[in-house]
Structure formats: structure tokens, C-alpha cells
Image (cartoon, rainbow, N blue to C red):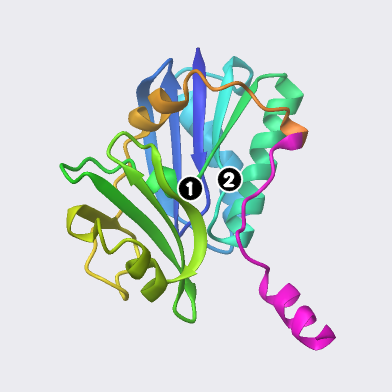
Amino acid sequence: MISLFLDTCSQIIRLGVLSDSKLIDYTEFTNDNKLSEKLLPAMKEMLEKNKYRVNDLNRIYISVGPGSFTGIRIGVTVAKVIAWSLNIDIIPISSLEVMASYDTDKKYICSFMDARRGFVFAGIYDNELNTYIEDKYILFDQLLEEMKDIKDNTLFVSNDDNYISCVESKINVERIVLKHINDKSVNPHNVNPIYLKLTEAEEKLNDKNN
């Protein structure tokens, strides 16, 4: 089984190709305003480099958020179109779980992204990638309060170090895929982005209406 792994939810775009659960190739590049132009060529290049075509894909693992609104939309849309057109499996995964795949001896991992104004998107997982605290949009100080009993045994993983000392996310794609390899495929039309908060435009509209 040939699978594509795709995460476009943060500042770093992650793209991998796997045979069953073995990672064949992997790349990262910066998320910028040209993501919609770069993504498909990057996927095509990686597949061709490894002697595959898009039609050889059997499954897509797609990170559905939270994170960058634009990045999530682009990645999820591309994954849904490919899965629908090829009639292949699509498996949605939290972007915070992807970040939490960092290898560590700590019992818990708190992965988070800056969401501005003191808020973060955060989730807490154990070292088997089981959810300990559900992904949420939360004030960072409140998050620390909620996890005070486990903080000393928690690794903080983020590319945003302005809240607390943390390590940069170095994901383990094979761990993620092994965790979800037996997941039931979702109808591509039912794969939706997970934003956890309103867009800035929606927030302004709500403020205006209230």
C-alpha cells in the first residue's frame, strides 16, 4: 500500500510517501503565500523521484488542523480531491497530534501553536499518542493551570517559543501512520478542516452584530 502523508497546518509544510508504514521519502518546506502553487508540484516531484505516480496512491493521511486557516484549507482541499478522484482511503489526523509524535522519554507531550493575543491551539498527548487533553483554543496561562499536575513530566513542543521553553517539532511520520493505519477511511466529502476558532473576519462580524 502506497500512502501520502500531508500536513499544511503550520509554518512548515510536511510531505511524505510511505510503503505500508515504512517512510520512503520525506520533505519539509516553508509555508508561504505561494503554497497553492508549490504543493502539487512538490507532491508530483516526490512521487516521480520514487518511481510512483499519483494513480499509484492507495491512501492519504491528511492533517486537518488546527493551525493556519489558509494552509489547512489548501491541504485539506487537495487531499479530498485526490482521494475522491482516485476513490482511495483518506484518514484525517489532528495537526497537534502530528506535532506530538516527537520522540521523548517524558510521559506527556503538549504540542501548541500561537493563536495570538495570548491564546494557543494546544493538545496534550501521552507518549503513545493517546489524547490526554483534547485539542483546544485556550489562553496559554489557562492551559498551564489545567495541566499543573503533569507539567513537570511534560515535553512542550512548538515552533513558537514566546510562551515557554520548548523544543521545535520534529515529527515521526511512521509513528503517526502506525497509530492510524487501521483507522476506517472517511468519505472525502466529510473530511472538514478543524479550526477551533472563528476567522478574524468572522470575529469582527460577530463583534459588529453584538
Q: Is residue 146 magenta?
A: no
Query: What amino acid is labelled 1 in the image?
Result: Ser
Residue 65 pos. (x, y %) = 55, 51
Residue 132 is labelled as: none
Q: Quadrant of the C terminus?
A: bottom right
Q: Residue furthest front?
A: 149
Q: Amino acid at mark 2?
A: Val
Local crowd at mark 2 within 10 Å, few (<14), some, or many (≥20)? many
**Which stretch did the figure color magenta?**
190-210
Judging depth in this view, the residue of 198 and 138 nearest the camera is 138
Q: Residues within 10 Å of mark 1 (few under 14, many from 20)?
A: many
Disc on the earlier residue, 2 or 1: 2
Query: Given contact means CB atoms under 8 Å apart, are the residues at marks 2 and 1 in contact?
Result: yes
Query: Which picture quadrant has residue 166?
Result: bottom left
**Residue 176 rendering spot, x and y as whole percentages:** 40, 32
Residue on which the image places disc 2? 64
Along the horizontal axis of the image, is 210 left or right of 104? Answer: right
Looking at the image, which residue is at 77% across and 79% down? 206
Residue at 49 percent across and 53 percent down: it is 135
Please name whichever residue, 115 or 141, is drawn nearer the observer in this view of the structure. 141
Q: Is residue 55 above or below residue 128?
A: above
Quadrant housing residue 58: top right
Q: Residue furthest right?
A: 209
Q: In what element is the residue under mark 2?
A: loop
Look at the picture and state if 152 lies above or below 172: below
Q: Secondary structure at mark 1?
A: helix
Residue 170 screen position, x and y as percent? 29, 47
User: Does residue 119 sit above or below 23 in this rendering?
Assistant: below
Residue 11 horizontal side relative to residue 174, left or right = right
Q: Tell me the CA gap for discs 2 and 1.
A: 6 Å
Q: Is residue 163 above or below residue 25?
A: below
Q: Which residue is mark 1?
A: 95
